[in-house]
Amino acid sequence: MSEQSDRPGLLDELPGELMIWVLIGSELLVFGAGLLAFLGVRVADPAGFAQAQDQLDRVAGALNTIVLITSGGMAAMAVPAAERAPGRARAWLAGALGLGAVFMAVKWAEYAGHARHGIGIDSGDFFTFYYLLTGFHAAHVLAGMVVFALLIWRPQRTLVEAGAQFWHMVDLVWILLFPIVYLVR
């Protein structure tokens, strides 16, 4: 065998399973396309987007950013614990799941406030993209919460690692969504 074939390849260096990385990559491409479309449409109407953006609750968005980053830390702590201390892994996963529920409650309150003011998905281009992007993200938060609930039941290290990787993708997407949708003019 040649010396070059003995070296590990890029795929050998990735933590976790290949398929979780395929899922994460495809999800990031979908969210990236949505954000690029949002930015492209915003170029055509910056004043309208700024006016619509002023109707968002930036404090709720910032709170949700802190909540997701904290839950990501909990998910990360569950990975090594799954091997050594399954009870501790369950506690970390329950904390991440609980913070996912907090995120959803804050997002639901935000959507309800918009609805009370008559703001819906058909309230202009900004809100069409806002609801599509944040709603799609919220669906991923719910999926992650289901995964965490299943992992609490069976905290096997490889499964916990895959769940944490998915959750970190959810975190990353929000870390991009929050400033682009809520803050950047």
Image (tube, rainbow, N blue to C red):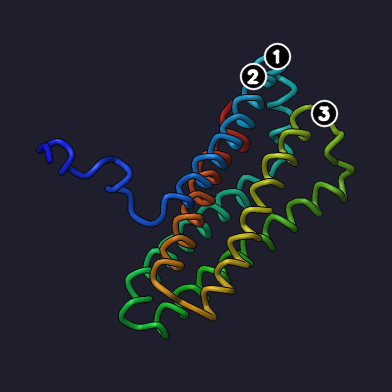
50 left or right of 100 in image: right
Q: Identify the image quadrant of the N terminus.
A: top left
- Of callouts 1 and 3, the N-terminal one: 1
Q: Position of residue 172 (x, y in %)?
A: 48, 46
Q: What residue is shown at x 63% (from left), y 60% (from top)?
A: 143
Occupied quadrant, residue 128: top right
Q: CA distance from mark 3 to mark 2?
A: 15 Å
Q: Give the secondary structure at mark 1.
A: helix
**Mark 1 nearby-residue class (10 Å; few <14, some 14–19, many ≥20):** few
Q: CA distance from mark 1 to mark 3?
A: 13 Å
Q: Which residue is mark 2?
A: 40
Q: Which residue is mark 3?
A: 124
- Of callouts 3 and 2, the N-terminal one: 2
Q: What residue is shown at x 74% (from left), y 57% (from top)?
A: 108
Tags 1 and 3 in contact by the CB under 8 Å rule? no
The mark lying in front, picked from 2 and 1, is 2
Q: What residue is shown at x 45% (from left), y 47% (from top)?
A: 21
Q: Position of residue 147 (x, y in %)?
A: 57, 66
174 left or right of 112 in image: left
Q: What residue is shown at x 83% (from left), y 38% (from top)?
A: 121
Q: Give the secondary structure at mark 3.
A: loop
Residue type (three-letter) at the residue carrying disc 3 = Gly
